[in-house]
Image (cartoon, rainbow, N blue to C red):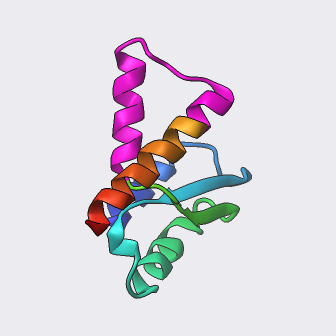
Amino acid sequence: MYSIQAKKLKDFPIENEDFDLVLIGSMFDGSPLLTEEMQNTVYPFAPKAQFIRAEEPPVVGGLMLGMDAAGNKLEGNARIEMIKKLGSGIRDKGKA
């Protein structure tokens, strides 16, 4: 899986770029082996990549993209606040 995506990294001149590579989804909640394997695959092409975990559930990104596509694009602090509200609401529903 990662080797296919890593080959795509060769198409981008990112070997000297600092950037965040955001890990989303519950598959990264368990053992660190998955993240370590991804790092082993990505670092040869992008040694300055910073692997970080998303704080909000993956569905929040989809909701924000949908809002953008519907012409309800939020900017700056309004976007950040909406992401926080959506994420906390989704997490609270899961506890019920």
Indicate the quadrant containing the C terminus: top left, top right, bottom left or bottom right: bottom left
Nearer-the-camera pick, 56 or 34: 56
Query: In which quadrant of the rendered view does residue 95 lie?
Result: bottom left
Q: Residue furthest top?
A: 71
Indicate the quadrant containing the N terminus: top left, top right, bottom left or bottom right: bottom left
Please provide the residue range marked out in magenta. 58-80
User: How far across and how far down the image is residue 6, in percent?
Assistant: 44, 59
Question: Which residue is drawn at the image coordinates 53% and 73% (left, top)?
Answer: 39
Q: Is residue 62 above or below residue 47?
A: above
User: How far across and how far down the image is residue 80, in percent?
Assistant: 60, 38
Question: Which residue is drawn at the image coordinates 72% and 50% (left, top)?
Answer: 17
**Would residue 76 be found to the left or right of residue 82 on screen?**
right
Question: Which residue is drawn at the image coordinates 61% and 29% (left, top)?
Answer: 78
Nearer-the-camera pick, 15 or 64: 64
Q: Is residue 88 above or below residue 63?
A: below
User: How far across and how far down the image is residue 60, in percent?
Assistant: 39, 44
Secondary structure that dominates the magenta span: helix
Q: Is residue 7 magenta?
A: no
**Would residue 20 be found to the left or right of residue 33 on screen?**
right
Query: In which quadrant of the rendered view does residue 24 lie?
Result: bottom left
Query: In which quadrant of the rendered view does residue 57 lie?
Result: bottom left
Question: Which residue is drawn at the image coordinates 47% and 76% (left, top)?
Answer: 35
Residue 11 seen by the camera: no
Residue 6 seen by the camera: yes
Q: Is residue 34 above or below residue 53?
A: below
Q: Is residue 76 magenta?
A: yes
